Image: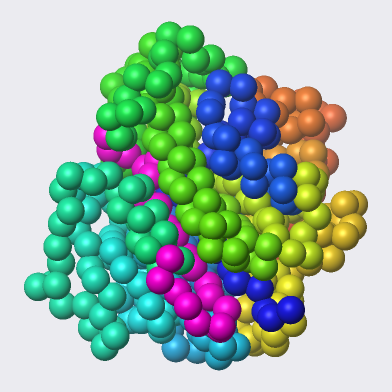
Amino acid sequence: MSKPNILFFFADDQRFDTIGALGNNEINTPNLDRLVENGTTYTHASIMGGTSGAICMPSRAMLMTSRTLFHLDRQGQDVPADHTMLGEVLQSAGYATFGTGKWHNGCSAYARSFSHGDRVFFGGMSDHYKVPLNPFDPEGTYPEDQIYFEEKRHSSDLFSSAACEFLDCYDSDDPFFLYLSFTAPHDPRDTHPKYHNMYDASSLSVPENFLERHPFNHGDFEVRDEKLAPWPRTPGIVQEHLAAYYAMITHLDAQVGEVLDVLKRNGKAENTIIIFAGDNGLAVGQHGLFGKQNMYEHSVRVPLIFSGPGIPAGEQRDAFAYLIDIYPTLIELLGLECPSSVEGTSLLDSFSDPDLLVRDAFLYAYKDFQRSARDRRMKLIEYNADGGRNTQLFDLEKDPWETRNLVGEEKHSEDIRRLRVQLDRWHTEFDDPTEPWWNG
């Protein structure tokens, strides 16, 4: 059999717990459920954090380069030539590479990654009915006078239709890599009219960790995301935002289904590796927050599903996986050589070994004033905002909603010390430029 094709769906701001088959009984995601049933889901997939309020920019750069957070160039705005991108490796292996949708890491990096494309959005966010689009430019220059709009179509429809058109027209024997990067469910939450009233806000559960306000200054209350709802937060406002958020995800799910149907119709489903992942999570009212500029589970954990040849069906893994691990996993799965610039860890062995942990702990960072480390049970979050130091410690086994801060309980002093040692180790290993203030 020839090398498998690769179909990669990437969502924008979709939280890890927004897929029906993974335990959310309030959301309708039949096509993502299908991927869960046919593939292997990583239930503890995470991002490393971000060095700017636009978490998605470094997150997407890390995805495509497998470089760790502090080894990116200009927060991921550009990708240096010596950071070999996933698309470059695949092209060298004979793949046709097609990219559509959001690309937040510079035109030159896109040009290096893709030999084909359509309806490309170079930016972070936009009105879903007025996305500034670029046609594919073989020269890779993308001048501003190329930009056009398709104002009567929602972004999720635009990008999925570009993917479907590519699949319908592709007639080469060479394998393909199709990267479909949605701008949903990122706000503004102006979803397709068909889905506007799909969810009754009053019937949706208010999160167990709902707060009217965050209990202290976490360092970024003025970021745009936190201004999406007034202070103090109310249960009703959170429910309204969740209804719109879920509606956008259900619409996105339908577009995933459209692409999967075209893939099957063209006889390519059996030899295609399918990946679904997200660039970061989102608070939407949890802990008194609305954005992703924090270290809580709702904001650092993301969906990650692999499906296709060589991948177990209907299974879940608790392995600690970062987005940077997707790149080396694909490379090993295809039997290719991994570039020396890659820093992630292949997840391939965990496909066959459900008990493989991959790594013992996670590091998270946001700007220079939030740092976090977690192991299989305990999670430490350190803050140094405007000169104010705060520390949180959560037992995620007993308290998955992160509601009970254990700092001050003597029996947990060793947990704090141990996780601060992890922060120190990572500070050196990952070249964190911030002074290690968490020991002060």
* Nearer-the-camera pick, 10 or 407: 10
- In percent of width and height, residue 289 lies at 43, 30
Q: Main secondary structure of the magenta part?
A: loop
- In percent of width and height, residue 107 lies at 30, 76
- In percent of width and height, residue 35 lies at 64, 47
Residue at the (62%, 78%) spot, across then down: 342
Up/down of 219 relative to 324, above or below = above
Up/down of 75 relative to 191, above or below = below
Residue at the (15%, 57%) spot, across then down: 149
Region in magenta: 168-190
Residue at the (80%, 55%) spot, across then down: 312
Q: Tell me if residue 178 is in the magenta stretch.
A: yes
* Nearer-the-camera pick, 61 or 210: 61
**Quadrant in the rendering for residue 376:** top right
The image quadrant where one finds the N terminus is bottom right
**Quadrant in the rendering for residue 249:** top left
Residue at the (46%, 66%) spot, across then down: 167
Q: Residue furthest left?
A: 145
Q: Is residue 124 left or right of residue 337?
A: left
* Nearer-the-camera pick, 53 or 93: 93
How many numbered discs, if any? Answer: 0
Up/down of 270 relative to 301, above or below = below
Q: Note whether residue 279 is visible.
A: no
Q: Tell me if residue 183 is in the magenta stretch.
A: yes
Q: Is residue 171 left or right of residue 381?
A: left
- In percent of width and height, residue 42 lies at 71, 49
**Quadrant in the rendering for residue 352:** bottom right
Q: Note whether residue 129 is visible.
A: yes
